[in-house]
Image (tube, rainbow, N blue to C red):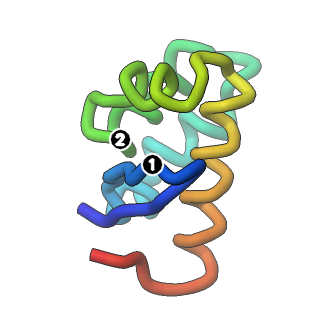
Amino acid sequence: MATITVDGIEFEYDENALRSYRVIRGITSYQKDPAGFFDALDIIFAGKSDEYADALGGTLDDMSRLVTAVMETASTGPAKN
């Protein structure tokens, strides 16, 4: 597990999940399969995606900021462990 800080809150995520075909497919197919999208978030955040969304403010936009930050961190370099 790796960590990232967003809005002063530290979150854990599975950096290996970001390389999973199933997870990437779930994220990119959100319009066709919304349930698959949320399943992918649960995989990335080890079942804590609802908790994390609430911690950030409880909106999809809040969760989107976290997912974007995680994806950007994963694509630009190693995560802080």
Hey, what amino acid is under mark 1?
A: Ile
Decide which of 68, 27 is in the foreground and name it.
68
Going 55% across and 26% down the picture, which residue do you hit? Answer: 37
Q: Which residue is mark 2?
A: 45
Q: Residues within 10 Å of mark 1 (few under 14, many from 20)?
A: few
The tag on residue 26 is: none
Q: Quadrant of the C terminus?
A: bottom left
Mark toward the start of the polypeptide (1 vs 2): 1
Q: Position of residue 58 (x, y in %)?
A: 58, 17
Q: Which residue is mark 1?
A: 9
Q: Position of residue 4 (x, y in %)?
A: 45, 61
Q: Is label 1 in a helix, a strand or a loop?
A: strand
Decide which of 28, 64 is in the foreground and name it.
64
Going 35% across and 53% down the picture, which residue do you hit? Answer: 13
Hey, what amino acid is under mark 2?
A: Phe
Q: Is residue 52 left or right of residue 61?
A: left
